[in-house]
Image (tube, helix red, strand yellow):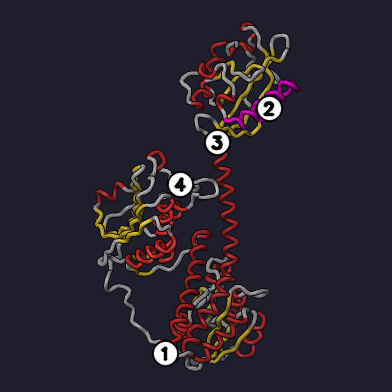
Amino acid sequence: MPKAAQCLLLGGPYIMPTSISCVPTAECSAGVQPHLLDFLLENTPDRIYFKDTAGRFLWANRALAEMLGLADTADAMGKTDFDLLTSEHADDALRDEQEVMRTGETMVGKDEKETWHCGRVTWAITTKLPLRDPDGRIIGTCGISRDITERKKLEEQLLRSQRLESIGTLASGMAHDLNNILAPILLSAPLIRDALAAEYHSLVFAIEKSAQRGADIIKQVLTFAKGVEGDRALLQPMVLIEEVAEIARQTFPKLIRIIHQDCPDAWKVSVDATQMHQVLLNLCLNARDAMPNGGTLTIGVANVELDEHYALMISGAKSGRHVVFSIRDTGTGIPPEICDRIFDPFFTTKEVGKGTGLGLSTVRGIVKSHNGFVNVYSEPGKGSTFKVYLPACAEQEQSFKAPVVEEASYRGKGELVLVVEDELEIRCITETILKLSGYRVLTAGDGTEALAIYAQQGEEIGLVLTDVMMPHFDGTALTRTLKKMNPAVKIVASSGNGNDVRVAELRLLQPEAILIKPYTKEQLLKTLHEALNAPHHEPVL
């Protein structure tokens, strides 16, 4: 096969002549010296090769050899795609080359997936054209391939991101409906409990607990899909450890032994409990998958004091007291070459359809939002240990000990409340609760009806409790209109989706409070009591 200088100068992988002809060196066009063409073809990052009519390599440049892991380009000479590629992809390549030689036409810019015998899987955009002798006869093919593997990965990530965005939009819409379904359960459970004999109270408590767990799951979905910020509270870490260990014992294969290590003096942390459940469960699920033949999963917590020297070595770490959650397995371990990539979004070692590559990136995002960090230690064949470091709360025993307020303190004193809610069940239960708690109540099924009532009895109405998402005239529009009618009106809004754009708009109008469904009877009464007794502030219109 002639050297590079014995071929016509190529204009690039996408602007090419209709064929390549072998010509004498002296006829090299444009006065370009042969060694310069050799240098160009050998050092271009694109893979360039020539094949005979049987598909055997006549010449290949360095880029092709490096991609195949060959020591020298000569190692590819005489081989065919069947020696380098899996049979499926080799068949496709041979079929394309035969078509080029049959028609004498160039095949420009075809995307190809390539699975090589060396184990690599790549994507390339390839142009193939006929190779001709000085008399114009076709004696083989020439190909130029540009590796687009990284571009394909980015495209796949973009598609996944778009799917996640769609899931987030769907979850956001479902959250409103599901929370409206759960709201009547949580609101009516105390009324039912009070009306039943004591031996049935445990059943009602179980109903309340299940409904609240459903609400927490919805919040968790929204946290993942939309990044909704949850409520944080001071928490004893052992509570989290015990709950997660119990879930693992009930759901993991019996071949996996679950151990949780007690640390009763663990410092408290200020966390969103639902998000931390998600962190620990994700790590436990990864540990489970790493032990397909069984093993031991150890879940623990400990106190640790980080000095400034250690904190400087860890990105995102700060010195001081920390609580460390540890998830240790005896599974397959993580190869060192991918250990630094496991927290990257969409990176997964699982088979297609069995992993999204989002679990550990979600873990890191949640922990980072809590001003913490994650460390991992692993040895192939010996298991892995993930450690989640969270800052311990500065105030421990005395913190967050708010005075206990009896529910009777939240009873009304005959104030008139206008309840605006398009869901009949929620409207009726809310009306019953408020009447039993000492309030007078007016109800409206939508914003238009509420305006008519307020226009007639506005001077008597002490507070308006309105849903946000209602047809035709929603809670945000109602609040804005009522504030114009009476800047001193007190409004408490409720919504099944705290991340809805209408809730964001509503916050600008400065209502007294916003309740996120589903809420309990106690939360409702406490919120109304505080709103009615709060000082008036001028709204932003």
Q: In this view of the protein, which residue sits in the foreground, 317 or 530?
A: 317
Magenta segment, which residues?
86-109
Q: Are marks 4 and 3 in contact (CB under 8 Å)?
A: no
Indicate whether residue 89 is drawn in magenta: yes
Q: CA distance from mark 4 to mark 3?
A: 17 Å
Q: Residues within 10 Å of mark 3 (few under 14, many from 20)?
A: some
Is residue 511 shown left or right of residue 374? Answer: right
Please name which of the two marks, 1 or 3, marks the residue nearer to the observer. 3
Q: In this view of the protein, which residue sits in the foreground, 56 or 332?
A: 332
Residue 127 image offset from top left, x and y in percent:
65, 27
Asked which secondary structure carries label 1, the reply is helix
Residue type at tag 4:
Asp
Is residue 10 shown left or right of residue 536? Answer: right
Q: Which residue is mark 1?
A: 408
Q: Which residue is mark 4?
A: 344
Instruction: Inspect this view and state whether residue 48 appears.
Output: yes
Furthest-right residue in this view: 103
Residue type at tag 1:
Ala
Instruction: Decide which of tag 1 and tag 2 comes sooner along the chain.
Output: 2
